[in-house]
Image (spheres, rainbow, N blue to C red):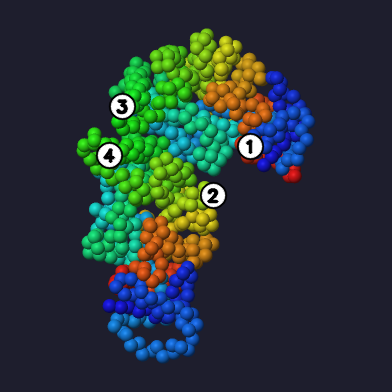
Amino acid sequence: MKTVLEKGNVFYQGKFQELDKLVIEKGKITEIVLASAKAKKGKAVPATKKKPEVAGKTIDCTDKYILPGFIDAHTHISLEEEGVGWYDADFNESYGLATPHVRAFDALKMRDRAFKDALTGGVTTAMITPGSANPIGGQCCIVKMVGNIAEEAVIKESSGMKFAFGENPKRTYGEQKKFPSTRMGTAAVIREWLMKAQDYLKRKKTKEFKEREIRLEALIPLIEGKIQARAHAHQADDIITAYRIAQEFNLDLVFDHCTEGHLIAKELGKWKARAVVGPTLSSRSKAELKNKTFDTVGILMDEGCVVALTTDHPVMPIESLSVAASMCVRHGLDEERAIKAITENPAIILGLDKRLGKLEVGYDADVVVWDGHPLDTRSKTEAVFVDGNKVI
Amino acid sequence: MSIIFNNVRIIMSGKFFPGQKVLVEKGKINMVGSSIHKNVEKSIECNQKYLVPGLIDAHSHLGLFESSSPMNDVAESWAEITPHLRPLDGIKMRDRAMEDARRAGITTCMVCPASELPIAGICSILKTNGNSADVGLIVEQAGVLMSFGEVPKANARMTEKPHSTRMGLTAVIRETLMKAQDYYAAKQSKKVVKDREIDMEALIPLIRGEVPMRACAHRAEDIMAAIRIAEEFKLKLVIEHGTEAHLLAPILVEKKIPVVLGPTLLPRFREELNEKTFESAIILMDAGVDVALTCDYPGLPIETLRVAAAMAMQYGLDERRALAAITEIPAKILGVDERIGKIKKGYDGDLALFSGHPLDIRSKLEALVVDGDLFIFSNDIKVEMA
């Protein structure tokens, strides 16, 4: 089975160009020919109209826009716990302070409407993470937006360990009249567990070692650098605290939300930070969001950070990912970088830039055809391919 | 970057002398004297205004207490003991009080968790500039904050903890210190493969005598309890608040225990503040005790540090010692007197320029330098660029 998209504007190598054809075969992109490349070849190939090898389907995309499927690098899609309330207290009470052994992957509900909504909004891949009530929340997974069972959708079952700084954990536990109720306490909990994990790993290699401990087992891949540390941090000082701890324990760190990142842009640039910024469309519902602005993305990009946008679904609905990118353009970011912030950059941040985030030969055929410019909010998706299968 | 303050008054052998110049280069004080001839980037003509070392508050919760918010990061009320809390992880550098501190001429603060628990956490020393706490940090582990008397008692009652008397609370401290001693000894023996314990790790510098126990104590009995424990465990000791310290002046002198005194401007809203008096400073100093003044922000607004010194003068203290109590002496008590607290060659470029005498409350802060970073707060100040 082979699908060919013909004509239209393709987002290729960082900008919109005129397409001649894009070929999808066996779930991958196998060929991309630009109109300009064809023109250069000139009259040598004038009579291609007979299309001899039409073994598959051809879709005429004249005047359409063809883009890689968008990626949201921070969501809670289908984790019911997040839907309970914006500070997910129920989630927290049922689990406890540090829950590194909790896996988002085990709670996916593939029939959640959000998966369909995502595809409608041009989103084909998302990272799904436990909530931010606990200092250590659990393991994140990366899935595509299709599949009857989670195993069909999965890219990585455990891609990162969620940590939370700032207001959420201290409010959650403070309201329960428990430790931690301060930022210092939150950091102390995280350090305590990371120290334990380091010592556990050391002890595991000795003869004294007897019984496994599930929480510490879960932290080993993190300590060994095999999965990322995902730090929920809004306020500048919380972002810096996350970095401080990551340095102490040599963690591979990604900043999530990063609401005040623009206030410490120089530092973040120096650290070559990877940041998943947002949900900027939401309201300033708590103190640590008071400096929220759509300028953050551009400022951080100018400093050399890799920045992706997020809806933090269900905080903002997943379809609003492209709207967030449009808002950044309204605030001065150029279109190309705004699109990168929902395609290439999240792929880099998730460590999937060898197969996702771009339209390139050999990449996953996650291709979306829009009837107008994708950053024009009036435009809609006309066709969506995930791994070469047409799902819309 | 270099800055010169021309024609200022600075303290020399206890008195303000006019016509002096101070040169700050690369964040440090490079030259002090009446005749400095050097090309500098920024030159400030000061018309005989008063230049003092950046002020130091040796006990505060700056940046941990969050302005205009019901949620702060000062105290872990619900925990038992938290020796491992690090202020660095809770300080908000963009909190409004940080700007207030700079505008009050304060360049350095000791920041610690609140004294609600018998063992509250570690004390850190921080400059008030810097975009992140790490940049402003001078000393991270500058002591362990412990607490005696009414405050931890009230907390214990509120949170229904097993110990809620002075006896019970000191027992908790003793128990923890004993554990820490044994933990350290076991660790040194190197025979046992043992997982680290984060709270015990934080107490090791204290047990080794590298940093002091900073004991919040108001009443004489509570101060004595702190002294007793410090001696039992061979700890260095600093008394914080010390409302009744003047009643123990001879003992404090003999044992060379300094006092971070205050906040004295508060009303006597608790039993243990009953003996509070502005004469404490002079009584203790006359006896030979090192005394620094504090406003215990947010106990009092951070801008009131100068007021505390002025009030001590009203009760008989001389100008030199009143000023030293918010510059030199806190630097000494914090163990950073090698680099801050004086206008002296080689010291950190921390300076505060006041329109009039710094202990005249009507004088206003016109310029501040922190680690060579210049902040101008007055239109009267003209900076000539080279």
Q: Closer to us: mark 3 or mark 1?
A: 3
Badges 2 and 3: C-beta atoms under 8 Å apart? no
Residue B288 percent across, percent down from the top left: 58, 12
Cβ atoms at labels 4 and 1 below 8 Å apart: no
Q: Which label's residue is closer to the chain start, 2 or 4?
A: 4
Callout 2 and callout 4 share a chain: yes
Looking at the rendering, in which quadrant would you find the C terminus of chain B? top right
Give the residue pinned by disc 4: A205
Q: Chain of mark 2?
A: A
Q: Residue at x 47, y 23 (%)?
A: B210
Which secondary structure, mark 3? loop
Q: Which residue is mark 1?
A: B27
Task: Please name the amino acid that badge 3 sits on.
Answer: Lys
Q: Residue at x 58, y 28 (%)?
A: B56
Which is more foreground, mark 2 or mark 4?
A: 4
Mark 4 and mark 1: Cα distance apart in space: 49 Å
Which kind of residue does numbered mark 2 sit on? Answer: Lys
Q: Which residue is mark 3?
A: B191
- The reply to the same-chain question for discs 4 and 1 is no
Q: Chain of mark 4?
A: A
